[in-house]
Image (cartoon, rainbow, N blue to C red):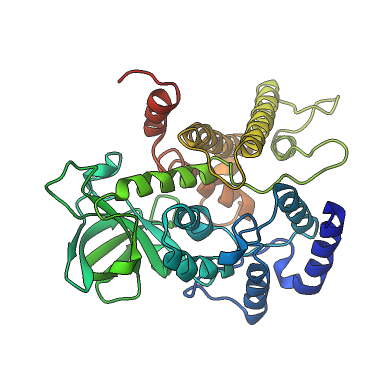
């Protein structure tokens, strides 16, 4: 099939299957079994996932689309053309799915990946602990062999979305006598059991995806061990590369083609709040210079991530270089949120009540939330250490 024939096929299928409720601005199309969803959007989620287009680069035998990079670009362009809200994303598609494709057994792939593709299961990550954040290998959550199953005891923290998750992928200590990197295993655990308690954590922004997760004699099935017992650190590190790839923009959708001059949202915001001079430029010179610099940095970053995706082998996430994109992407996200509130002046610092428009309140809360961007997924300091040692080869 030619690429143009594929485009016509995609366009026709979307016309027939994508409902108006999934087009344009609105709430995300939810995944998993614990968030509410209308029958119409559930049908859209299953139809889209059933074609394998929620994970278009994954193999067809596990529920993926098996599409080429060129076909994925066409799919993204046609979705953007109708402003479709697609039921994809989350830790299933961005983290545990790619990891299972590399390290999972054939039975694990067949058991979990089709459900991820359909969006029927939501996942969360059990890595950090109160005493093991930056030093993740210091984790102490224990998993003990009980014959027919494993028993898990301990606590995880910052488990994003745990209150809505159906499953958790987690690192546990299985050999306390071994060197700390060698006694860790990677296990998949069903969240719907009495041995697991989840407590949401509220942050300064007023809301938070983060939770505390407690394991009290929780049960993990033996066939959910990914890789070898006591050799989970390798699997866990690879998953972090997939995570940082997503946070750094390496797994983003192809940019939409535009005709004419590209729109600059930051410039529009500056003109709205700061006004224009007689020549139509942003009135404040310092803000004008910063808008230009931000646009140039964003364009350079987008071009670099696109090149990195094109240079990597099909659907494969790069290795330690993901830390470069995670570091720079996090910095840009923080700077963007901070600059938006700066442009709005006092209007960018509202919390609630009259006198503030919804987008102004949203900008302030977004600014507060952005302070965590350089922490989660591995702090910027950790990323710089990885870049220095693993990418540049500098001595300890």
Residue reaching furthest bottom? 39
Residue at screen point 82% across, 58% down: 6
Residue at screen point 34% across, 55% down: 227
> Is residue 247 at all visible to an observer of this figure?
yes
The foreground one among 312 and 156 is: 312
The foreground one among 285 and 51 is: 51
Residue at screen point 75% across, 33% down: 275
Query: Can you give x and y, in whole percent of width and height, for residue 167 in the image?
Result: 39, 67
Q: Is residue 242 above or below residue 9?
A: above
Query: Can you give x and y, in whole percent of width and height, for residue 35 in the image?
Result: 50, 73
Q: Is residue 310 left or right of residue 228?
A: right
Quarter where residue 338 is shown: top right
Residue reaching furthest front? 106
Q: Is residue 60 above or below residue 375?
A: below
Q: Is residue 183 left or right of residue 48?
A: left
Q: Which corner quadrant holds the N terminus?
A: bottom right
> Is residue 216 at all visible to an observer of this figure?
no
Residue at screen point 62% across, 47% down: 252
The foreground one among 321 and 24 is: 321
Query: Can you give x and y, in whole percent of width and height, for residue 253 in the image?
Result: 67, 49
Query: Can you give x and y, in whole percent of width and height, for residue 375 in the image?
Result: 40, 40
Q: Which corner quadrant holds the C terminus?
A: top left
Q: How many numbered marks are there? A: 0
Q: Is residue 249 left or right of residue 47?
A: left
Residue reaching furthest left? 177
């Amino acid at each position: 099939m030619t690429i143009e024939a594929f485009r016509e096929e995609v366009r026709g299928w979307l016309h027939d299957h994508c409902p108006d409720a999934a087009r344009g601005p609105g709430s995300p199309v939810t995944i998993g079994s614990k968030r509410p969803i209308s029958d119409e959007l559930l049908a859209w989620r299953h139809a889209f996932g059933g074609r394998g287009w929620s994970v278009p680069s994954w193999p067809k035998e596990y529920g993926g689309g098996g599409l080429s990079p060129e076909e994925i670009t066409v799919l993204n362009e046609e979705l953007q053309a109708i402003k479709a809200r697609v039921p994809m994303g989350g830790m299933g598609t961005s983290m545990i799915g790619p990891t299972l494709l590399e390290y999972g057994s054939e039975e694990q792939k067949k058991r979990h990946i089709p459900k991820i593709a359909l969006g029927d299961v939501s996942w969360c990550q059990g890595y950090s602990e109160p005493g093991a954040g930056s030093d993740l290998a210091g984790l102490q959550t224990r998993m003990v062999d009980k014959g027919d199953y494993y028993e898990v005891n301990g606590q995880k923290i910052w488990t994003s979305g745990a209150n809505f998750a159906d499953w958790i992928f987690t690192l546990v200590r299985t050999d306390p006598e071994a060197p700390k990197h060698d006694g860790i295993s990677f296990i998949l655990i069903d969240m719907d059991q009495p041995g697991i308690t989840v407590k949401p954590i509220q942050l300064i922004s007023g809301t938070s995806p983060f939770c505390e997760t407690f394991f009290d004699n929780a049960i993990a099935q033996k066939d959910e061990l990914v890789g070898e017992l006591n050799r989970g650190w390798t699997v866990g590190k690879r998953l972090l590369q997939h995570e940082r790839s997503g946070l750094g923009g390496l797994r983003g959708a192809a940019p939409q083609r535009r005709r004419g001059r590209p729109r600059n949202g930051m410039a529009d915001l500056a003109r709205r709040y700061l006004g224009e001079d007689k020549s139509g430029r942003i009135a404040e010179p310092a803000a004008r210079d910063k808008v230009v610099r931000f646009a140039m940095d964003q364009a350079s970053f987008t071009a670099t991530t696109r090149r990195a995706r094109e240079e990597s082998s099909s659907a494969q996430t790069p290795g330690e270089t993901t830390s470069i994109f995670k570091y720079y992407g996090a910095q840009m996200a923080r700077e963007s949120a901070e600059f938006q509130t700066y442009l709005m002046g006092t209007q960018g610092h509202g919390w609630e009540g009259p006198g503030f428009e919804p987008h102004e309140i949203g900008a302030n809360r977004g600014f507060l939330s952005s302070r965590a961007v350089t922490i989660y997924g591995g702090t910027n300091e950790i990323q710089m250490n990885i870049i220095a040692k693993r990418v540049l080869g500098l001595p300890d």
